[in-house]
Amino acid sequence: MPVTPFPRPASFTAGDGPGAPADAPVVVTLEQDLPEQGFRLRTSPDGIAVAHRDAAGLRYALQTLDQLKAGADFADVAYEVQDAPDFAVRGFMLDISRDRVPTRRTLARWVEILSLARINQFELYTEHTFAFRGHQQVWQDASPLTPEDVRWLDARCAAAGIALVPNQNTLGHMERWLAHEPYAHRAENEDGFTFDGHHRSPSTLEPTAENAEFVLGLLDDVVPHFRAKRLNVGADEPFELGTGKTRERAEAEGIGPVYFDYVTQLIRPWVERGYTVEFWADVFGNHPELMDRVPAGAVPVVWQYDSASLTAAVIDADGEEVAAWRASGIDVDGLRDGFRDRARLLLEAGVPFWVAPGTSSWNSLLGRLDNALENMVDAATVGLDNGATGYLNTAWGDNGMWEPPSVAFGPALFGGAVSWNLAANRDLDVAAVLDEHVLLDPTGTTGRVLDRTGRLAAQLGVFTLNASPLYRALFSGGDLPAGTTPSDEALTEAGRVLARCREDLRTADPASADGDVVVRELTQAIRLSELAVDVLLARSAGGGSVSPADARRLLTELERLLVEQRACWLLRSRPGGLDDSLGHFDTLRHALTSAATR
């Protein structure tokens, strides 16, 4: 049976043979008329002909040829492939700041997967997890990447045709810095702020020239270890901006200019050095007065992590979350349009931008695969319709990154495929690609379980953004917002699915080097999900509170699972951040302890 390569090509023909002998010569020609990174590949009894425009096109042609040769009937099939990417830059961003810093072995595994998916840019998102000179107090307990780590990874990426790009936040999400006394004065609100009804520690730098110089010093320390002439300065979600030290200026000038004056101070020195500088467009994209102020060489990146259909379902449910949006002045109904609404002002102004969907693996335990796939297709569609040259898939690690890395493997592959060619890959069988190309499981079990469990969140009958209900149950101690608790029937069925998937993994046989790790960490994520089901059913049976007997049983199970969580973590990740990650289970532990002694 003819082999279909991954990613699926723009044009692919597998005709009745004869094809090329396995040892046939490969004739390579350079054709400037082909698109950038594009190629043409033909096999026949006369040999194998490859035409390409550039080095990247040749790389992808030979990768495709290797996949075709893996077919037992390669010599009996005449193949013709013509291919080129939809997006020139196809990126993947991995969050290594929310406690989970990967080992070198894990980073090398990611390079393999990204190379397979034809990703050509790999970003590592850091806040405090690089060993900055002179700032040991901030990173000493985090097992940070060292300059040697970065140079090692940069070399591996270069060998795989991937640009390794620094992604260092420079405005918001600076709480790990501001928590230390030498840096506390740099905060917009040194006493913290209230967000979503809760008091939070300071997280946003005051946008001053002094702080810009401080951040530029951090960039000067980290960026030279990367050979790519690109960087991402982040600057997203400055929640406190305009509420503290910059309140008067924001009231006089507007939040937009306050924000972008500061960000421009970070961008200009780097574009003047010939760098392409990315920055997140969540603030920028809401201010029409800023649309003509983007320095040449800077690229706003539009992110959106929930699919249009899920967002519409949440809006239609009109729960507490939507009420809070409306109260804050958000155009809630516009969110139904997904990326098109998120990028509306940039589209109207004709400002070039990139799109950034997400793997939906964070805040999930097992992923939200349906949401991820729709979100990525939406990003590719809007990006293609409007000439976006970059597509940056993101894997964040919010709240301790409880989910195992393998939960993001499938979404990473799908994001690479649809950013390479949307039309050919939008209905890709993710489970099959995982088993055939990544996990090497001839039983087809491991990929199928990742796919099945990844779709469970969408089958619980409730609609939540940015998190699965089962994850939220563990994180909140079982106390979910009104309207977001699955029914007993849905929870019982979820428990059955989880148990079946856990049993199925006993027959899995992945031959990849990390196959045993995948099975173990996925089994652990399933058991945590089963615990969430048990907690919610126990609360329901107790009329909203867990009985003492159930609490003691659940508490025993939680402590047992945390031992295994620690062990699984260390299979892929460095020890720094592990205790912080496990600390996010404290709300559940305290709730169960209180119920057990009631």
Image (cartoon, rainbow, N blue to C red):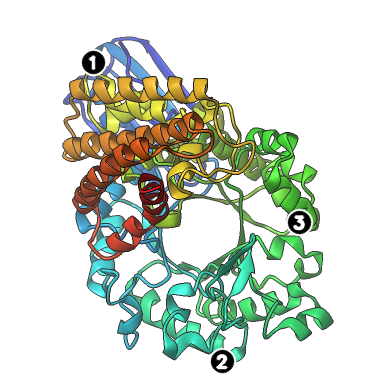
In the drawing, what numbered circle is on residue 503?
none
Q: In this orientation, which residue lies closer to the viewer: 353 or 99?
A: 99
* Tag in front: 2 or 1: 2
How many marks the image carries: the answer is 3
Element on which disc 1 rests: helix
Residue under the image location 77 percent in, 65 percent down:
287
- Residue 427 in view, yes or no: no
The quadrant where residue 122 appears: bottom left
Q: Where is the N terminus found, in terms of image quarters?
A: top left
- In the image, 141: left or right of 218? left
Residue type indicated by callout 3: Gly
Residue denoted by label 2? 210
Residue 75 tag number: 1
Q: Earlier in the sequence, mark 3 or mark 2?
A: 2
Look at the picture and state if 294 lies above or below 160: below
State the residue at coordinates (59%, 69%).
297
**Residue located at (76% from left, 66% from top):** 291
Q: Mark 3 against mark 2, which lies toward the viewer?
A: 2
Label 2 Cα neighbours within 10 Å, binned few <14 / some 14-19 / many ≥20: few
Up the image or down, 155 lies above or below 220; here it is above
Identify the residue under disc 3. 350
Give the percent coordinates (x, y) of residue 578.
28, 60
Tag 3 or tag 1, which sits nearer the N-term?
A: 1
Q: Is residue 75 left or right of residue 28?
A: left
Mark 2–mark 1 Cα distance, whole angstroms, equals 66 Å
